[in-house]
Image: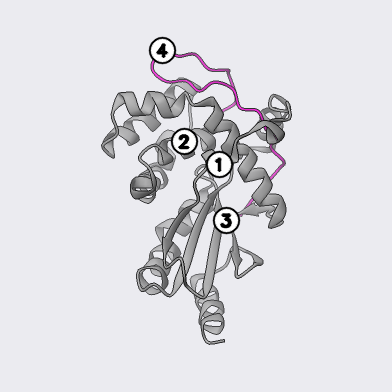
Amino acid sequence: MKKILPVAATVAAVLVAGVAYQSFSGATDSTSVTSFAAQAQDGAAADADLSLVQEMTLGNPDAAVTVIEYASFTCPHCRTFHEGPFQKLKADYIDTDKINFVYREVYFDRPSLWAGMVARCGGPLRYFGISSLIYDQQDEWARGEPAEIAASLRRIGKTAGLSDEQLDACMQDADKAQALVATYEKNAAADNITATPSFVIDGETMKNMSYEEMSKILDEKLGE
């Protein structure tokens, strides 16, 4: 489980194909997160247009039980969840319309933010497919220099069928980046999220758990 440090708000320009962006540390340790936060404290939460951020959901929006996952694309434990327990959750509860599933991104650093921007670039219909590619290739893209990370994320986007023009527009959208970070901070504070992955099941925040534990909780709530 990866612990979350506060990430403040204003987000700088994003590098795409010849467009320069501010340098940052590609690591996801506490030093890089603190550095990211220190460079981003300009009160963006107050200025951001949160309407730019769409909630990403699967399953039955009218289900009696809602599961919210908070996860970061640069978090190895989140990748482990998506490679294993999430597949069972999807088959047993999401695809069967037993629950409403909401995925919320956590931003430890700029690479995780850029990954979120690429995942969202294809809209809600492509979001979870692109997210799967990002998690599957986490070891390949989430390291190296900024230009290398951006290029790797672009390759994933293009594999998913996005055009260069789409990726350029998405990764250079500073207003959207600002709104994403502000939305993350607002939601994480409201749900008391301190680590990833974390889950909010019918309003109750819970830490990472085995699929068996989650399934037991869901069955109990569905039986109420």
Amino acid carrying label 4: it is: Gly
Residue for badge 4 = 18
Main secondary structure found in the magenta portion: loop
Closer to the eye: label 4 or 1: 1
Task: Give 2 or 59, whichever is nearer the viewer.
Answer: 59
Residue for badge 3 = 197
**Mark positioned earlier in the residue sequence (4 or 2):** 4
How far apart are the alpha carbons under marks 3 and 4? 34 Å
Closer to the eye: label 2 or 3: 2
Few, some or many residues within 10 Å of mark 1 (<14, 14–19, 20+): few
Q: Is residue 8 magenta?
A: yes
How far apart are the alpha carbons under marks 2 and 3? 19 Å
Residue for badge 1 = 51
Closer to the eye: label 4 or 2: 2
Amino acid carrying label 2: it is: Met
Classify mark 1: helix, strand or loop. Answer: helix
